Amino acid sequence: MKLPIPTLLYLCAAGLFGYAGWTVYKMLPLLDNKTNQDATSKGQKDGLDRLGKGKGQGPVTVDWQYTDRTAGWWAQFKAPNYIGKLPEVPVDPKEQENKVTERPLDVRPLEQIIELVSLTYDGSTLGKGGNSHVIVRYKPEANVQPPEWYMRENALDGAGGPATALPRDVAATRGGRPNQPRPNAPMPTSMVGREIQQMVWIDGGDDVRRTATLWGEFDNIKLVRVAPDAQSAFFVRTPPPPKEGEPAVEPKEEELIKTNAAISQDLLRELRVLQGRSPTEGGQRRDVAAGAQNTWIESESTTQVGNRWNIGRQDEKRFRDPDELLTQIHVDTYVSNHSDTRGLVVRGIDPQIASNFGIAQQDVLLEINSRKVQTQAQAMQFVKGEYNKGVRTYVTQWLSNGQIVERIYQAPDK
């Protein structure tokens, strides 16, 4: 016999109602305080009796406190193994210290990692002198990680773009009116998409800012010398330590040629050959390298030896007429907030001028022939006056990348 659904629901409801009524009827005696207390006492006594009977029936434990003796057990208890994976074998700290982790070397060509921005040649020891150095710009695909001090000094300027490369204690002025100093910006969390430049020295010394190797994972690449014409630099990669029984690998020099165009290094070497120069001589011009101090060497193009520029005939007109030169160089007044240092900061410069005269954007001109520079008009008037007096050697001091550098320009006699 099949009962209809409403009848089944009615029977279930009636059963639940009856069970609830029976439960209430059984609990009515507990409304009396004495009966309630007697039932509570009986329950506690039964619990203690059962607990006493259970003691000693199972494994004996040391204690159940969070102490050093039970730390291991509690650690396993908090991290149960649900998948059956064997636990890792503990490593002896001494063995971990002695174990050398071999880092895979980056074998990319130098031109895929860095490019040369400027070079300075110290001819005291064939380009290996302590003052020989280069400024390199890392390619975006290199993904280099700069040191912490570089990230602090080049922090993002608030929520806008990258901060200016001027020193932090300096405020530039326009039209003689000082700008308000900007507060220190927080350290950026990423350097992605930002231009990263490093000054690499032959003799790094103990200064963290004056290193002979590249940054980050490229610290096995070291600068060893600069070509006499300051148009190329030579690097070596420190090879990994040889395995037992194998001979040590002699590092080989790798030349990187400076260029302002997207031209491969192989093509630049071929261009050297077409110009009648050896592809491995580093573009050395022996006539200029052998020139005497304060003596102009006949040359069509401007050449550099160390910190001295021999101005060629092609640039003679620019150097003779400062007005024309300054039309391609935009400068502002530079004032330090913490000292009386003044000068002219380069805001913009023609790439050809920058390459020929070794001047970079944000460089600050401080002195010309031991005379301090404070305004653009003063600098132009002084250079014109000196040139009309027959002066052809100009010793200048610059603030470049946080350091004072000297650059000497030798103009043609006539």
Image: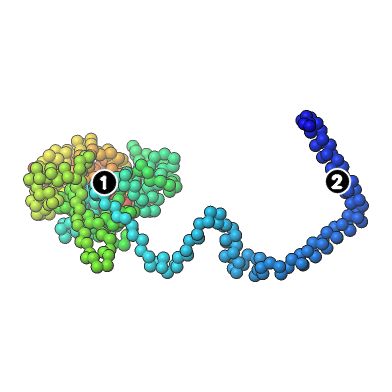
Location of residue 153 in the rendering, given as x and y in whole percent from the top left corner: 38, 50
Viewer-proximal residue, 15 or 147? 15
Viewer-proximal residue, 182 or 221? 221
Tell whether 27 sits left or right of 372.
right
Q: Amino acid at mark 2?
A: Thr
Q: Which mark, by number, is residue 23?
A: 2
Q: Residue at x 19, y 36 (%)?
A: 324
Location of residue 141 in the rendering, given as x and y in whole percent from the top left corner: 31, 44
Residue matched to label 1 = 112
1 or 2: mark nearer the eye? 2
Viewer-proximal residue, 194 or 31? 31
Whether residue 318 is visible to the viewer of this picture, yes or no, is yes
Residue at the front extreme of this rendering: 1
Disc 1 residue crowd, few under 14, some 14–19, many 20+, Cα 10 Å: few
Tell whether 266 sits left or right of 148.
left
Location of residue 300 in the rendering, given as x and y in whole percent from the top left corner: 9, 42
The type of colouring in the image is rainbow
Q: Residue at x 76, y 64 (%)?
A: 51
Say which element carries label 1.
helix
Q: Give the spatial CA distance, label 1 vs label 2.
A: 85 Å
Q: Say how many tags the image has.
A: 2
Q: Is residue 21 above or below residue 288?
A: above
Whether residue 398 is visible to the viewer of this picture, yes or no, is no
Q: Residue at x 86, y 40 (%)?
A: 18
Q: Amino acid at mark 1?
A: Gln
Say which element carries label 2.
helix
- Quarter in which the N terminus is drawn: top right
